[in-house]
Amino acid sequence: YFSRNVRAMISSIARLDPQAFSTHAKIGGHYVNSFNATQEAMEKGFDSAILLDHRGYIAEAPVANIFVVKNRELLTPTPEFILPGITRKTILEIYSKINGIHEVDMSIKDLWDADEIFLCGTATEIVPVTFIDYENVRPRMAIRQKKVGNGKAGPITKKLQKLYGQIVRGEIPE
């Protein structure tokens, strides 16, 4: 899915409302929403979109969950309004042994203030988000583009990439 750092934008397309659809299931029709958000992002020169939920909080990327690293702690959206994936669950288990994890309603400010951001999923495994664009946010922010961290994968993202890779390849016995 992604083989490098990801440049992402906040999509004008919202994630499906769980009161209108069964959003905790992988249903083929739901992928149309993700496809439209991805098309929007690619037409504007980005690798991926970040979708907000029906309340305006960060939900997920198309076919990937999202994590924010702030002060060595992980933030990720609450499971009520996302499709909580197996990769996300694995990361929660791995990192809970290292440091704190918080499932919270994440705002765009949480992305803006992040030390690191990464996406995860079966196809993506773990990929860093190194650039965010807020073009579609209302009201418009004075600065609408931001490099995440130093513009490269951060140390926690790298550590999780390595651990996750070792786990899925059977290199860690437990």
Image (spheres, rainbow, N blue to C red):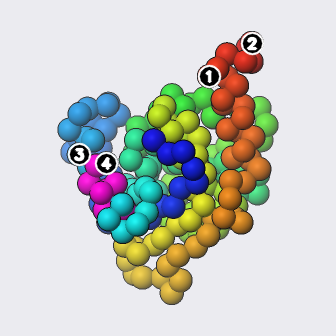
What amino acid does circle 4 point to? Answer: Ser
Asked if disc 2 and disc 3 are in contact, CB closer than 8 Å, the reply is: no
| 94 or 78, nearer to the observer | 94
Q: CA distance from mark 2 to mark 4?
A: 36 Å
- Does residue 7 appear anywhere in the picture? yes
Residue 102 sits inside the magenta stretch:
no
Where 112 sits versus 142, above or below? Answer: above
What amino acid does circle 2 point to? Answer: Pro
- Please give left or right for residue 106 compared with residue 92 in the image: left
In terms of sequence position, does the residue under pointer 2 or pointer 4 come before the other?
4
- Does residue 54 appear anywhere in the picture? no
Q: Position of residue 36 (x, y in %)?
A: 26, 54
Q: Position of residue 116 (x, y in %)?
A: 67, 57
Q: Position of residue 106 (x, y in %)?
A: 53, 57
Where 166 sits versus 147, above or below? Answer: above
What residue sits right under mark 2 in the picture? 173
Residue 39 sits inside the magenta stretch:
yes
- Please give left or right for residue 25 compared with residue 118 in the image: left
In terms of sequence position, does the residue under pointer 2 or pointer 3 come before the other?
3
Q: CA distance from mark 3 to mark 1?
A: 29 Å
Residue 46: mark = none
In terms of sequence position, does the residue under pointer 1 or pointer 4 come before the other?
4
Asked if disc 3 and disc 4 are in contact, CB closer than 8 Å, the reply is: yes
Question: Neighbour class for label 2 at 10 Å: few (<14), some, many (≥20)?
Answer: few
Question: Neighbour class for label 1 at 10 Å: few (<14), some, many (≥20)?
Answer: few
> Principal SS element in the magenta part?
helix
What residue sits right under mark 1 in the picture? 168
Q: Which residues are magenta?
A: 35-41
In terms of sequence position, does the residue under pointer 2 or pointer 1 come before the other?
1
